[in-house]
Amino acid sequence: MRVLIADKLSPFVAGRLQDLGAQVTQETGLSGQALTARLGELDPEVLVVRSTEVSAADIAAAQGLALVIRAGAGVNTIDLDAASARGVYVTNCPGKNAAAVAELTLAHLLNLDRRIADNVRALREHRWAKKAFGGAPGLNGRTLAVLGTGTIGREVIARAKAFGMRIVAWSRSLDADDAEELGVERVDSPEDAVRHAQAVTVHLALTPETRHRVDASVFGAMRPGTYFINTSRGEVVDTQAMLDAVRDKGILVGLDVFEDEPPGADGTFELPLADDPNVYGTHHIGASTQEAEEAVGREVVRIVSAYKRGRRIPNCVNLAEHSPATHRIIVRHADRVGVLAGVLDVLREAGHNVQEMQNIVFSGAEAACARIEVVGEPAPETLRAIASRAEVFAVSASPIE
C-alpha cells in the first residue's frame, strides 16, 4: 500500500503508517501541476493532505488512488464530485482541532475587547499609553452570537460561558432540545442572532449554501461597535460587506481566515484589509497547536488502518445517503464457491443494477444470507431462476421503504 503525504503532519504519522505495512512518501509543498505529476509517478492508494487542493486532474492522475484524507475538518479543498465519480473515498478528521480553534477564537475576542495587539505594538515602539488603552467594555454579562454549533462552535460556547457571557446561537441543525442542553438561546436566523449581541463569532462549514451567508444583511443587523470574529472559512463571509460595516458602524474584526489567502506557508499578504486599524488578523493558525496536530495525526492513522483492514472507512463524506435501489432481494444459500456469482449472473441477465450487497455467514460457515439491493422490481421468473439453483435455500424480494 503506497501512501503520499503532501502536507506537513506530526512526525509520528509516517512511522505509524509504515508499521501498518505502508510504503510512505512525504513531500510537503506539492500543489497544482506538481502534485498532479507526482501522483501519476507514484500512483498511491492513499493521499493525505492538509490545506493542499486536490483537483479532478489529481484524482485522475493516480489510477490506483482509493482514499483521500483531509487532515483537518473541512473538505472544500477537494473535488468531491470527481472523487465520487471514480469511487475514491474522501474522509476528514472532524473535531480533532476543535479545542485549538476555540482557544484562538477566544483569544481574538479578548484582543478585540482589550486591544492586546495594539498594547504590544505601543510598547515595542517604546510608548506608554495607559489612558488610550484603558476603559474596555469587558466580556462578563455581554451577549455572544455563535453562528454554527458544530464541534468547534460548542467548544467556543463552553469557554465563553466560563467568561460569564450570555449565548445566542443559530445553526441549521440546532433544535430546541440541543439549545437547552447547550444552555443557549436558539434563534431562527443569523440576523436574529446578531441583532442584540455585543460580539459575533462564526463557525460555519463552507458549502454552496453558506458561501457569503454572513453578508450585508447580517452586518446590517449588527449593533455599532460589535466585535466580529471568523475562524471558520474566509468564504462564508462577504468581505466587502464586512469592511463596509467596519467603516460605517465601527465594527471591530478578528480574523484567522480570509477569502483570498496566499498559497503556501510563507509569502506576502496584499489584501487591503491588512491596513485597516480595526481589523486584526492571524495567519490561519487556528488548528496549528501541537495538541491538535497530534490528534489529527492519530486520526489519519486510524483511517488508513481501517482502509487497509477492509473495514468501514471513518468520517467518509462522499458516500450516497440514499442509493437508487428500489428493492431488496434476500437469498439464503449454502456458503460455497460460485453461489453468489451465479445469483449476480441472473440479476445481470435480467437487467438489474446491484447498488449494495451484504453477505452474512452463519456459525460453522455452512450457510449464509445475502441482502442484495437492486434498481427495479425483480420479475417472478427472475426470482424463480435464482431459487432454482441447487445451493440456494430460499429467495424473496420486497420494496425498500
Image (cartoon, helix red, strand yellow):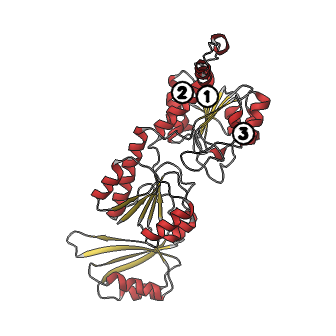
Residue 190 position within the rendered picture, expressed as x and y whole percent measured from the top left:
68, 38
Residue beneath label 3, please?
272
Farthest residue toward the front? 126
Quadrant of the rendered structure where residue 41 is?
A: bottom left
Q: Secondary structure at mark 2?
A: helix
Q: Which residue in the protein does label 2 denote?
A: 160
Q: Assess disc 1: are there few (<14), some (14-19) or many (≥20) residues with their C-alpha within 10 Å of its C-alpha.
A: many
Q: Mark 1 = which residue?
A: 144
Q: Residue at x 29, y 88 (%)?
A: 390
- Above or below residue 13? Residue 240 is above
Q: How far apart are the alpha carbons under marks 2 and 1?
A: 8 Å
**Disc 3 vs disc 1: Cβ atoms closer than 8 Å?**
no
Question: Which amino acid is tagged 2?
Answer: Ala
Which label's residue is closer to the chain start, 3 or 2?
Answer: 2
Evaluate whether residue 132 shows in this view: yes
* Residue 325 higher or lower than 303, as above or below: below
Q: Position of residue 268 (x, y in %)?
A: 62, 43
- Type of the residue with mark 1: Leu
Tag 2 and tag 1, C-beta contact below 8 Å: yes
**Element type at marker 1?**
strand
Rounded to the nearest whole Å, what is the CA distance between mark 3 and mark 2?
31 Å
Front-lying residue, 369 or 209: 209
